[in-house]
Amino acid sequence: MKKKNNNSIFYAGVTVVIVAASFFYTWKSIIPKLSENKAKSAQLDINISSATLKLDSLKKAQTTLTQLGDIPTQLSVSVPEDKDMPNLITELEAVASKYKIVLPTITVTDGASVAAVVGTDTPAASTNTVIIGLSAPGSFESIQSFIADLEKDIRFMNIKSATISSTEDEKGATIMSLSLQIEAYKRTSATPVSGQ
Amino acid sequence: MQNETEPAPAGVNPNNSPGGTITGGVARGNPNSRDNLIPMGDHSHFNFALVLAWLVALLAILAMLYFWWLSRNIVDVVAEKQSKLDSINQQIEAPAMVKVAKDSNDFKTSVGILSQAKKDRFSIATFLPTLYTKVTNDVKINSLALTTEGKLSIAGTTKNYRTTADLVMALKSWGSLSNVDLMSVAMMADDAGKIEANFSISADVVKAPAVVASSTNSTTQSISQPGTGGVQ
């Protein structure tokens, strides 16, 4: 009877050890890894969902851009990546010469540098603008046509202010003079460029 | 308690257990054997506890195996998802898609800038000819200044005060201007000695649809090539 009791204790002990070991191993090793992987899986689900959305959006954008044809290209000319000085000056000169207007002065300033100047009187200047100042003498008709063409130009420009004045020369002929402050646009908000 | 080494007499319950277990006498053929004299009531009680204990142990092991299987399973799932994510990211980072993303962003930025700029636009080219229809022949405008904020100022000469007043009345009656104000008017002699009325008028432009800009015409102009030199 005593031997059998000892056996019972032994088996009970073995059972307790097995249960305890199983519990301990499950609790300390398997469950944390399981939780960690579950969290990782949930995060991956979010990432996959986000990446899928992005990919779908890109595919849709690709289709839309294809359907739009030349419009994106034209827009990139209307609002170039940077201020694109050479093309801007050439364009202004081309429009002016169309109406036999000579442009004695053209100043081009980066809107960012204007905006950076404290106390500036140019509140409209923003980081993605290019401020152009020009003056031009000419007849009223040519000045008017010049302004109209500037407003229709593919390079989008807003005339912020215009001053037209007339004077008479020695012979009594009227000379009109135009002074314009124009705002053109660019996509990048570049750091202020000095000396422009 | 009866000594286990002593065989119990036939028909006597050695433990006096309530179950009233019948025990046998000395085994046949092997009178010295004591093993078959273990009380049956003790034996059944021991078996039940042992089976229960082993069942608990088995359940514990099964539970552990179940969690282990879950863990292994989710590792595979994670690996599969990671692979899927990598595949999608690879597609996103392909040069063609990078270009699409850039073009798309450029397009969006351009449209945003243009729509805001168009909102701010005030078409001087549309406004000027209409303004000049309000000016009579005997008025000479020496200077005209107009800003997109809608401030208009005109300075000029007329024959007399009456003509100046007529001009102011004409401008006031025009719906595109408000706050028309005759800032100054004075009769003065010009260089030739002729007496004229010099005036100065200010007004606010009402940005009605009639005088607000039309859209850009993207087909009439082309951009010249760079390289013409920088005019500062």
Image (cartoon, rainbow, N blue to C red):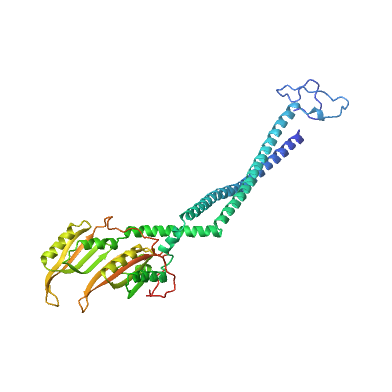
Left or right of B86, for residue B194:
left
Q: Work out whether residue A52 or residue B151 is closer to the camera in this orientation and state it.
A: B151
Left or right of A92, for residue A65:
right
Residue lying farthest top? B11
Residue at 68% across / 38% down in the picture? B57
Left or right of B79, for residue A72:
left
Question: Residue B224 occupies which quadrant of the picture?
Answer: bottom left
Residue lying farthest bottom? A170
Left or right of B92, for residue B137:
left
Q: Is residue A158 visible?
A: no
Q: Percent from the top left, x then y, of residue A76?
A: 43, 62
Query: In the image, is residue A196 above or below residue B202?
Result: below
Query: In the image, is residue B220 above or below residue B81?
Result: below
Q: Quadrant of the C terminus of chain B?
A: bottom left
Q: Work out whether residue B13 or residue B225 is closer to the camera in this orientation and state it.
A: B225
Q: Percent from the top left, x then y, of residue B77?
A: 61, 47
Q: Is residue B226 visible?
A: yes
Q: Percent from the top left, x then y, of residue B161?
A: 11, 66
> How many dots with numbers?
0
Q: Work out whether residue A193 or residue A73 is closer to the camera in this orientation and state it.
A: A73
Q: Percent from the top left, x then y, of residue A107?
A: 34, 73
Question: Residue A6 occupies which quadrant of the picture?
Answer: top right
Q: Quadrant of the N terminus of chain B?
A: top right
Residue lying farthest right? B29
